[in-house]
Image: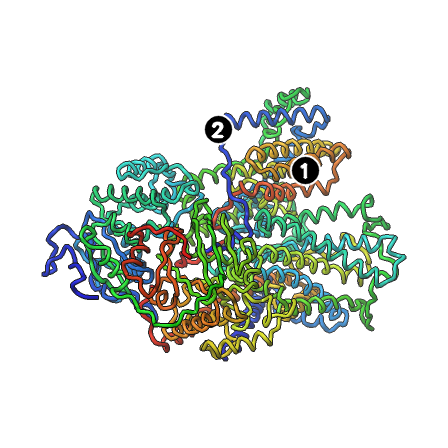
Amino acid sequence: MTGSRTRRILLGAAAPVGALLVAFLITSVLLLLTGSNPFDAFGAMASAFGRTRIILGTINQTAVYYLAAVAVAIGFKMNLFNIGVDGQYRLAAMLSAAVAGASFMSNLPGPLRIAITLIVAMAVGAFWAGIAALLKVTRGVSEVISTIMLNAIATFVVAYLLTPQMLAVLEGNNISTPRITDGGQVSVITFEGSTTPLFTLGILAVIVGAIYALVLSRTVFGFSIKATGLSESAAIASGISVNRMIVSAMLLSGAVAGLIGMPELLNGSAASYSLNFPTGIGFTGIAVALLGRNHPVGMVFSALLWAALDSSANALQGVGVARELVTIMQGVIVLSVVVAYEFVRRYRLVLEARDVARALAVQTPEAVAV
Amino acid sequence: MTADALPSPAGRDSAGKDPTGQVAVQLTGITKRFPGVVANSDINITVRRGTVHALVGENGAGKSTLVKTLYGMHQPEEGTITVNGSQVTFHSPADAIAVGIGMVHQHFMLADNLTVWENIVLGAEQMGSGGRLDVRGSRARIDELGRRYGLMVDSGALVETLGVGARQRVEILKVLYRGAEILILDEPTAVLVPQEVDELFGNLRELKSEGLTIIFISHKLDEVRAIADEITVIRRGTTVGTADPKTVTNRQLAEMMVGSALPVPELRESTVTQRAILQLAGVRVAGPDGREVLSDITMTIHAGEVLGIAGVEGNGQAELVDTIMGIRPLAGGSIELAGKDIGRSSTASRREAGVGFIPEDRQRQGLILEGSLWENRILGHQTRRPSSRGFLLDRSAAKADTRRIVEEFDVRTPSIFVTAASLSGGNQQKLIVGREMSEDPVLLIASHPTRGVDVGAQAAIWDQLRTARAAGLAVLLISADLEELIGMSDRLTVILRGRLTGSYDPRTVTTQQLGAAMTGAGDDHVGEVA
Amino acid sequence: MSIDSDVATSPPTYRAPRKLSPAAWLGVIAAGIAVVSLVRIWTGANNLNSSGAIQAAITAAVPIALAGLSGLWSERAGVVNIGIEGMMILGTFGAGYAGYQWGPWAGVFFGIVCGLLGGLLHGLVTITVGVDHIISGVAINILAPGLTLYLSRLVFTDAPGGGQRQSPPVPDVARITLPWLSDWLGEIEAKGWFFVSDVASIVRGFCTNLSLLSVLAAVLIALSGWVLWRTRLGLRLRSVGEAPYAAESLGVNVYWYKYIAVMISGGLAGLAGAFLVVGLKFQDGQTGGRGFIGLAAMIFGNWRPGGMAMGAGLFGYTDGVQQYDSTGSAMHAFLILVALALIAVAILQYRQGHKVVAAVAAVIAALCLWWFSATDELPQQLVKAAPYAITLLVMALASQNLRMPKADGLIYRKGEGH
């Protein structure tokens, strides 16, 4: 039985590794079919990491993707599908940018400004997710559909607010929230030979990841979350209030989602929210969480992989391959990994059943049953 | 089981020939094995055409397995099946259907959002012109079947608007529509109220008069006597005897079901105190469709007392347990724990007040199968020491306590880090018992605590319960195992159709009394169980 | 026999909606037109139901309706399809690729095929492997745009009139105009009479410049209703989405019908994509979330083709008219219609005894009326959010009337019944 732990770890790693191999295989076939050389393509992608700028950009993106993944993973632990992370983070980024760039903020000390910005972002994210939670708990509305709807509504609310009459200002040809003045941002660390600095707010990812890991493994609340996600019937019998867990999980998920845009806002050069603000990170979060199996450390690796793939995409142009190849790889990885996990899960059940049968055969045979 | 107590198998002379009428179904020497378990062994049944033949036995006796064999859902290791004189082998239900056998499952297989006729014709649709369904023709045929056999149902209604009795009629029509002449009904009265049972029996008599053969599986002796022409009793996987309902006595039947001699409890000191721990007064609980599943439950359990509740499954035991644990709301009445009203408390606060719970379905309610043993130790106790301190889990204390439980309760496991799923049923149960007995509970709800547990683990659990009882624990014991009930209880009561009936001393109660109370054939003794 | 998880979240219990006779439906429609007419005259917003607006509404509604139909076929067989958007995107590429080379109908065909392949992939992953339906859909939504853009750069860049992210122009399919009827109705419309002119303008919108693909879409919607409720295939397919283990026990090959459903679903999504391309061209990002609006229409329509079409019509209306009407007065006047509809909902819910829901509906109606009086026009972006907000509202207020196929999303594995 002690061998089962190593076996579990091996099986757990088999799926993502297998998925990666499958993705490489399929994209190689695609490249060959469309007249390109796979080795050239992958070689170009790998060589991109010779430049400091690319490495730093990858690290910055890893932190952001990790935050998105944790937001999604909190929901997953409860068997909830928070597809709304995308809308939550954009709405949170926009509103917190508006607050951060507001004139009254200039009079406040730097750390306070940053704290306010972060708190507003988390509150907005939690609020937006809370709508879906409320609908689920009171009216039984599936959080999948409601968060998809809320994503779209968030897009349009942001578009509406991002006009000069509302929260935005016009600077030349650019519409954005007012720029955050000096002292309202967090300083970055620059490196020689790189136009891209290191986003220090990536530290948020470390903090959030640590809290996520600790809460899940060391608190009563985290225990209740895991229990409810694994067996709702056992959770009810043990006294856990399922509705309370649903609402808590969604609010926390939304709050973490709110932090996704903070590195870009408080470290980035734009220092404001405009239509150029990165989009689609919510869906990346889903992919990264799936690949990392909602595990605090696993998601670090999957976030890193995703960011690395993104960063190397531009290098493909040099060998005449469209950068969308990376997107294709990512899509294939997601599909392969979930397929692989399903196979692994079933194989594991077969193994365990065999163990149980072996153990039963050793015991004294029971009297006739059923 | 003495030979003279058994009536001879009806319908067959000593040469084994069938003189009285045509035999619809004959099972000879059927044996079915599963890994580690022999479910059926040497089953012999003769079902004559045009009769209602009842297959009776307690839960776990092997009826369902046998019936699945007859319906082609699996194949027996040994034995033969003969239908209408010819030997058959079934590889799937389709084969059984082709020979004229139709099965009405205990749990209805109906699509709520489809209409009655859609549910009935599915898979055997009548086609009209141009690829369309022949709606009118199908409905006409269904209505005709309904008229002929007295199974009245609106073929155009949505199934979800139908009550339980009507749904059952739809299930019967489903098999009749496919030309079944031999019907197998698996526990058909499990979900019906008395009126609906009468309606069903009327329908069955109708079907019988049209020449159909009915195999009726049940554990409710009283009903079976009202409808069956012949009764075959199954116990522990084998046929124990056949009886003619018109001539067999209650006592004979009860003995067949339960065994002729009840276990004798060992002499022990009474540890019952005067301090009332659990008091239910006039408790009423309603089911999802508004019907009362528990009526006027009044009972008291004192510290140091084990109250055993006997009863055929499905009479309200599960609802009673849920209500006391706070999983089901009260519709009326009160529940008090050591004098405090807990009727509106949450499950968590009831547990914190000292209620331990050994659930009937340990895998669904008692354990998180994918969790480790020490994590399962925390389950249900996560807000208290030693599992937690404030809002933090105390992992080391939980692990240490798990080791203690493993030691004290003899849980066979290589470590406390394996998943609960990898433990055998007996060891899982020992872990649960150990967990629930920690932290000195005042009340323990034990629902079928040794079901599916090996003999050794069973003895160990009984020992632990007795020790705790001597220390002042109050126990509500619900079980279908009479040996357990009589051996463990200080007082016995029986639950029947949501009411408690009778109060018995386990040292003096007889088979007949218990059997009669459990099946409702005796006097209905509805009163307070003080 | 203990309570299972449903009770924990305690959703409201289902109430079957009342069925109306055809005559009653006509009455409702007539009353509706009368109300619309009154609002038009009072606000002077002619584009509320001008024939031009109706045409724009139809053009916007068709892809939504086809997407909704796609979702409907899939979910009726119990397979949740979040990936409609991705399958539509595949359809746009197929239509662009074949359309500019071999004509619009070739484009339609290829669009359907590409969408169908997407559906097949979804089916393989969810039905055969048993992966969660939503995850598969999300994965397809990630994969499809990337694959499409990759191929677009490959084949369209050097094509005449094309570019990296767009195809050369694709010719249009035939459009129907009934000349004499259209002109005559046009005259009546211009008069602006109460009720008569409105009927004229609505009918005119339907018989002027009507794309054959729109006609095809309408036919497909009607056909879907017929097939699903009146044929053996449809009955078995629906049974698989309601009670797959019951169907299995009756000898129905559940896997087979699920596959048929997802392939039809994919094909319809591809057709929706083709509709966007034909007469225009393929463009990166042209689906614009219509896959999700289609899902919303399906929910709005309670998983029935007729209701879904109404939902698609409503959402297409808000989308199309808002683009067509440069004055913005039509959308502004639309607020009144929304308020009136909500008041009707409030009354109905109150009569059914749902006081809280009725109160919420009435409050929102009051807000709409206040918004109408306090502003001159609606901000364009918020109008675009209308379909989603309306769906959310419907789901929240009418959840007891909504009836998803019972086994929708269930990961079915043969032999695991009971």
Q: Name the residue under label 1.
A: C364
Q: Is mark 2 on a helix, strand or loop?
A: loop
A180 and A224: which is toward the camera: A224
Q: Can residue B370 be seen in this view?
A: yes
* Neighbours of disc 1 within 10 Å: few (<14), some (14-19), many (20+): some
Question: Which residue is drawn at the image coordinates 80% and 68% (left, top)?
Answer: A197
Question: Residue A267: x, y in percent?
Answer: 80, 63
- Residue B166 location, quadrant: top left
Q: Mark 2 points at which residue?
A: C21
A292 and A223: which is toward the camera: A223
- Residue A189 location, quadrant: bottom right
Q: Is residue C22 above or below residue A8?
A: above
* Neighbours of disc 2 within 10 Å: few (<14), some (14-19), many (20+): few
Q: Which amino acid does label 1 sit on?
A: Ile
Q: Can residue C247 be seen in this view?
A: no
The answer to which of marks 1 and 2 sits earlier in the sequence is 2
Total marks drawn?
Answer: 2
Q: Which amino acid does label 2 sit on?
A: Ser
Quadrant of the rendering where the C terminus of chain B is positioned: bottom left
C30 and B168: which is toward the camera: B168
Q: Is mark 1 on a helix, strand or loop?
A: helix
* Residue at the extreme right: A107
Question: Residue B274: x, y in percent?
Answer: 47, 63
Task: Give left or right: position of B527 versus B390.
Answer: left
Q: Are marks 1 and 2 on the same chain?
A: yes
- Residue A305 location, quadrant: bottom right
Q: Distance between the residues labelled 1 and 2?
A: 30 Å
